[in-house]
Amino acid sequence: MSEVLVVVDHVDGAIRKPTFELLTLARGLGEPAAVFFGSADAGATAAEQLGKHGAEKVYVVDDAEIKGYLVAPKAEALAQLVEKASPAAVLLVSGYEGKEVAARLAIKTESGLITDAVDLAEGGVTTQSVFAGNYTVKAKVTKGTPIITVKPNSAQVEEVGAAGTVEAFTATISDAAKTAQIVAQQPRKASGRPELTEAAIVVSGGRGTGGNFEPIEGLADALGAAVGASRAAVDSGWMPHTFQVGQTGKTVSPQLYVANGISGAIQHRAGMQTSKTIVAVNKDEEAPIFELVDFGVVGDLHAVLPAATEAINQRKG
Amino acid sequence: MNIVVCVKYVPDATADRKFEEDNTVDRVGVDGLLSELDEYAVEQALQLKEKAESPEDVTVTALCVGPEQAVDAVRKALQMGADKGVLVTDDAIAGSDYVATSLVLAKAVEKIGVPDLVMCGMASTDASGSVVPAMLAERLGLPQVTFASKIETQGDQVRIKRDSDTATEVIGGTMPLVLSVTDQTGEARYPSFKGIMAAKKKPMETLSLADIDVAPSLVGLSVSWSEVEETAARPPRTAGEIVTDEDGSGAGALTEFLVSKKFI
Ligand SMILES: Cc1cc2nc3c(=O)[nH]c(=O)nc-3n(C[C@H](O)[C@H](O)[C@H](O)COP(=O)(O)OP(=O)(O)OC[C@H]3O[C@@H](n4cnc5c(N)ncnc54)[C@H](O)[C@@H]3O)c2cc1C
Ligand SMILES: Nc1ncnc2c1ncn2[C@@H]1O[C@H](COP(=O)(O)O)[C@@H](O)[C@H]1O
């Protein structure tokens, strides 16, 4: 069986959840082999977890020389690995870096590329959600090694014991690939809440909060949810841009999305329309968000949310 | 300094977007416009020009690959203030995927003369792949600094700020390079009346594949490296239950709903 390369998304060795989802999907196409960019030590530690989630092999590419140089060196290394392993597909997480590594890799290996898959079936048939979630498209790569970026939350994380055998892979990186560099980096402070794109529940606030996100955060914490925001809330400086849901923010597809004081503009919908269950609280009964909801409350979020939060907390005892 | 801004002509997102029978995006039968997200790239290019020591030495060229109507997108960029426009249009291009589109763009950039900066939007509003800038960089052999929320240049040095998933980063590179910008860079200007009048006299070139030395057999739907098998409109969401909050009833109903769906 051919290998399916899964590029590991991690921060200083801490593997992010979407990588495990990719390993689940990879099993349907071949034998999952993770690709870890990092030190040998970190790779060995990561391999344990990757194996637990289905990786038979873990290629460790030492990144001492390329750390901080962003996508170009990674694409070069992967192209060399593709050459060596002739995988059935290469899977990456749909994020800034994953997409751009995939883009360069596609050109280098003369392979077709599919971005933002939300499902992956036998034969490499992908499902994508396009036009702000109004259409679903099924597609397939027809040339070279299918390179596919998959959105977070597209598959269940499954634990299956696999070998997770470490294999060091030495890549030759050109100087030309080392030209754009991270010169400063400020890791984001942990909010203590789930990651927006990974959360099972997202509670969002918009202009209707008037800048007071306490009711949003209160409900989010009662539900164990992540907090999101509309662009209007971000543009007003109430929330950092990383909380933005929508076309130019994050795309989320949780089990439950609660939109509060958000009108439901097409650009916002683009980021949340595929959520399984949608709830909205808005004081305007004509707000377009109500066209999407499974349940809606016409009312003032400043009254409804704190009361609901209290009721929920009481139930949980 | 030469800046090329890549601007895409896309179906209007607020109108009905649809697919053709061959599963390609309908780009002809619907209203199209300059991709909103590319307006931010045009804006940033114009600001770099205006901030330059001698703005008259900076040329901003708007480049688009698309159908004939796509000239509207280029024209809008000219009205905003770009100096020159180039549209690459050819029947053979229809249905091209990212790979082919990036080839045409790269060849057109080379034809214009490899610039100091190739600027792109963060994503096209129709395909929203966010991959063309990286592909273009790969094809042109240039570094890429992408998803900028803020741009600073000093001589040939470029620094951008970007919000990635886990950190806020400053990324640096040396021109020539490919740069993409997000909508966080700041509002794009509206064309002024003067700008609209001036645009009519600006150089506007239309190129075919032959003009940029791309064989028609390398582009278009039939040589696409990926294939759309099926497109389906998402079933409309079934109308949900909507209640009106009266004296606190909304919170109770909301809680009941969440309990009934086992979220609590
Ligand atoms: C290129 C581009 C990209 C964009 N990308 C995004 C994106 O990624 N994400 C995004 O969200 N937007 C995006 N937008 C902006 C989008 O078009 C809307 O402007 C934005 O989503 C509106 O945010 P909002 O719903 O919070 O504000 P509004 O549209 O002003 O709606 C506020 C809502 O709050 C309700 N309200 C007011 N007070 C209360 C109260 N006390 N209780 C309950 N309800 C109340 C009002 O009835 C109203 O419906 C983009 C726009 C463009 C042009
Ligand atoms: N056909 C095109 N013509 C000009 N520029 C394009 C075209 N396609 C993509 N681009 C540029 O590449 C960016 C990203 O596009 P995409 O990868 O399709 O999301 C856009 O914002 C444009 O700047």
Image (spheres, coloured by chain):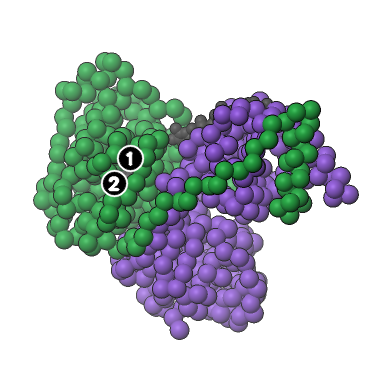
Chain colours: A purple, B green
Q: Chain of mark 2?
A: B
Q: Residues within 10 Å of mark 1 (few under 14, many from 20)?
A: many
Q: Is residue A179 above or below residue B190?
A: below
Q: CA distance from mark 2 to mark 1?
A: 8 Å
User: Residue A272, which numbered label?
Assistant: none
Residue under disc 2 on the same chain as residue under disc 1: yes
* The quarter of the displayed image where residue B44 is located: top left
Q: Which mark is residue B26?
A: 2
Looking at marks 2 and 1 on the same chain, the residue that comes earlier in the sequence is marked by 1
- For this orientation, the residue located farthest to the bottom is A1
Q: Quadrant of the N terminus of chain A?
A: bottom left
> According to the image, label 1 marks what residue?
B11
Q: Amino acid at mark 1?
A: Pro
Q: Is mark 1 within 8 Å of ligand 2?
A: no
Kind of residue sitting beneath label 2: Asp
Q: Nearer the viewer, residue A101 or A200?
A: A200
Residue furthest to the right in view is A317
Q: Residue at x 53, y 50 (%)?
A: A274
Percent from the top left, x then y, of residue B62?
26, 35
- Residue drawn 42% across and 51% down? B233
Q: Quadrant of ligand 1?
A: top right
